[in-house]
Image: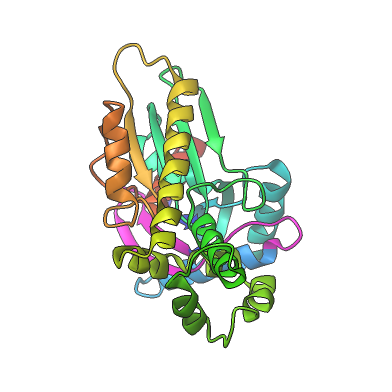
Amino acid sequence: MNFAIGVDGGGTWTRAVVVDQDGHELGRGETEGAVVTTHEPEAAAEAVRQAVDRALVNTSLSAPGDILWAGLSGAGNDEARTAIEDVLVKSHVAEKIVVSTDVEVAFHDAFGFGPGIMLVAGTGSIAWARRPDGTVVRVGGWGQHIGDEGSGYQIGMDALRCITRAEDGRDGPTALRDTILRHLGLEDVQGLVGWIGIASKREIAALVPLITQAAAQDDPASKGILELAIQGCRRHLEAIFEISGPWVDQPPVVALWGGLLRSGGPLHDEILRVVGDYGLEILVRDPDPALGAARLALEQGLSNRQ
């Protein structure tokens, strides 16, 4: 084996890591998000290819790699996974292609093949656990239309709804109105109707820093929005802890992942307190999903050689 590639693709970023046969990191690259859809898998495949190209640019290596493991948002069903695998195979980025979800590769970096709980809140949200017997359970991950509680997308949408309610007089005024209109280059609230019709999930979630800034300045609407997100994450954790148990020998370690929960993220400290309320141990580092994918790629490649 010459080199393996691990890719983590979510709603905001796609990151690639290249490692040699001993697992030593050779290069990294990133580009925009890669969310798999069955009707247009080419967009996610292009993001994967760009991230890999950028990871290889400062090495003496070139595609194809021996094996690529891509953990991608939206790849949780067979139809989507097959669609993106077919496109990636044709791209010749690696001799062998394996696709899983982005949560799986993040979990692998945090826990390997062992037990644990992972709470995720970034552009979307989900909770994932592996029991000591190896079985896997999940909570959430239902997507932007019927799920994503506690996510950046939900926070962004709640902010837009607050603005329109305030415009109607159904709610009190909020500092979010002028802040978000200025950020989007819109003249009035009516312009939000056109913007939301073409905005991506990533663009809506990208409003989060504006909301956290307004909350820090005591805007009541913004503080309420963040509290709703915290409650959404809390309910994910409560449910995953309940359905993954009982944890007889010792309580599980909890890993936090995603832009809202990583170290320094806007919900990190509050969710740490929630985890503490359950008496659970927290993983002290942020997971590195792309590296987790690279390790899975190596393990897959080595097993094929035996």
Q: Nearer the viewer, residue 306 or 299?
A: 299
Q: Quadrant of residue 189?
A: bottom right
Residue shown at 41% from the left, 66% from the top:
211
Residue 3 in picture, x, y percent from top left: 41, 56
Residue farthest to the right?
Answer: 39
Q: Position of residue 198 (x, y in %)?
A: 67, 74
The residue that appears at 33% across and 25% down in the rendered structure is 252
Q: Nearer the viewer, residue 296 or 167?
A: 167
Tell me: 171 left or right of 222.
Answer: right
Query: Which residue is more in the foreground, 143 or 91?
Result: 143
The image shows residue 260, relative to residue 116, as above or below, that is below
Residue 5 can be seen in this image: no
In this picture, is 221 found above or below 124? Answer: below
Q: Quadrant of residue 17?
A: bottom left
Instruction: Give x and y (percent) for residue 23.
Output: 32, 49
* Figure disc tally: 0
Is residue 58 at all visible to an observer of this figure? yes
Please provide the residue range marked out in magenta.
13-41
